[in-house]
Amino acid sequence: MADAFVDPGRIRSYHAHIYYAPATRPAAERLREAIGREFTVELGRWHDEPVGPHPTAMYQVAFPVGEFARLVPWLMLNRSGLDVLVHPQTDDAYDDHAIHAMWLGSKLPLRFEVLRRARPA
């Protein structure tokens, strides 16, 4: 029996996580300003220390499904060498980060054990 396909209608919204280091924070700041100015998004707080499954400093950009086709191609071309994780928001944070995610730049080693503890039974 084949695995069932996942209905894209389950996607409520998306997150982009913009990763930075102390040396690349100025580039991350410029990118954040441009994203906030050009797109319909909700900019999350700066996290200068690892938080949740994220192994390094980052901030989150939350955006609606309808903004995906504009924002993600723009990030592909304008991420200033920063690593970016883009994932859907469904009812399963583990699958969203581990299986359904896409990376722009290098794929960082997420701390999935944090999400396993929160994963629904």
Image (cartoon, rainbow, N blue to C red):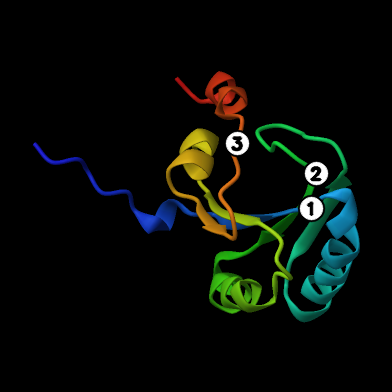
As drawn, 95 above or below 45: above
- The answer to which of marks 2 and 3 sits earlier in the sequence is 2
Where is residue 10? Give x, y as percent. 43, 51
Residue at numbered disc 2:
57
Q: Secondary structure at mark 1?
A: loop
The residue shown at (77%, 60%) is: 42
Task: Tell me, yes or no, whether the two marked residues, 1 and 3, touch with CB atoms within 8 Å.
Answer: no
Residue at numbered disc 3:
110
Disc 3 marks a residue whose amino acid type is: Leu
Q: Secondary structure at mark 3?
A: loop
Which image quarter: residue 51? Answer: top right
As drawn, 43 above or below 95: below
The residue shown at (78%, 35%) is: 50
The residue shown at (71%, 32%) is: 52
Calculate the distance from the C-alpha at mark 2 to the C-alpha at mark 3.
12 Å
Which image quarter: residue 28? Answer: bottom right
Task: Tell me, yes or no, whether the two marked residues, 1 and 2, touch with CB atoms within 8 Å.
Answer: yes
Where is residue 120? Give x, y as percent. 49, 24
Left or right for 48, reference 96:
right
Residue at numbered disc 1:
20
Residue placed most toward the observer, 63 or 33: 33
Disc 1 marks a residue whose amino acid type is: Tyr
